[in-house]
Amino acid sequence: MSSKTTRATGTTWTDTLRALPWIGPAILLIATIVLFPAVLMAYNSTRDISRVGVDSGSLGLENYQQLLEMPVFTGVVLRTVIWVTVVVAVTMVISLALANLLNKAFPGRQLLRMIVIIPWASSVIMTTTVIYYGLEPNYGIIQRFFADLGFLSQPDFGFTKTMPWAFIVAIAIAVFVSLPFTTYTLLAGLQGVGKDVLEAARLDGASGWKTYFHVILPQLKPALAVATIINIINVYNNFPILSVITGALSGYGADTTTTLMFKILRNMGDPGLASALSVVNLFIVIAVIACYIKIVKPMKGVDE
């Protein structure tokens, strides 16, 4: 190893040690609330744990085998992928349109920006519950509204009682509550686009559409990447919506995604099997994010 390389390595370690008092608490917090539970979850997924928490020994991969052999597992995974893909895609498209609107100067812009925050400031369970009861047959206010407009002959349609309507309602709610964060993330990205760059594009004779797709969107890649990845994680783990919409409807066949699996495991009371499902969920969301980064390459060309 050359002396230059040795000095560089020594400098790197010195800088790391100097930064440790500042980053140490964050590392400790991550290790305590993220890494340790994840390792414990993976360990429990291979154990025979009773309903009351007594560990009777190792089962190897039997919990995973039992999970995969469940008749509903394939359909649940498929619907979960559809759930995440549709919600994230629709959220990104609508949020991008809203961000572009809110980035323009017009009367009432500040008020509209505040209104957009409301779904984010409200409780997800509260929002979902209000919509759920609003769609209840015969007495739901949303049902009555649709009937008054002529969309329904009678206000007794089971929006939350059958597939695919319960699935569609859950998707619509998930998009609604995901819009504020995504919109403001993209709005921050838009406001970071330099005016000199836009002026240069205008002087070069670029049209509005060319400027947007060839100048603005490429500079939005970091914001788009952050918003997409966080939305994938949030939507995948957004069980309150699905729990409220389909939580008491197993008799109607309205169960949709992995909430059905958790309901089954809750009734079984098997912590080892539940841990196995959690590990599978973790790998699924990691795989989805990895595929997104591999296919879309969100950071490609950002620094070019």
Image: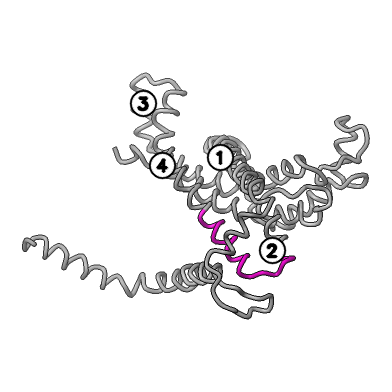
Left or right: 189 with respect to 129? left
| Label 1 element class | helix
Q: Residue at x 52, y 38 (%)?
A: 103
Location of mark 1 (residue): 92
Left or right: 54 with respect to 126? left
* Mark 4 or mark 2: whose residue is earlier in sequence: 2
Q: Nearer the viewer, mark 2 or mark 1?
A: 2
Q: CA distance from mark 4 to mark 2?
A: 34 Å
Q: Badge 3: few (under 14), some or many (20 or more) residues near its Cα, within 10 Å?
A: some
| Label 3 element class | helix
Location of mark 2 (residue): 265
Residue 70 falls in image quadrant: bottom right
Tell me whether circle 4 and circle 1 mark residues in contact (CB < 8 Å).
Answer: no
Left or right: 6 with respect to 116? left
Q: Is residue 290 above or below residue 262?
A: above
Location of mark 3 (residue): 201
Location of mark 4 (residue): 294
Q: CA distance from mark 3 to mark 2?
A: 58 Å
* Mark 4 or mark 3: whose residue is earlier in sequence: 3
Q: CA distance from mark 2 to mark 1?
A: 33 Å
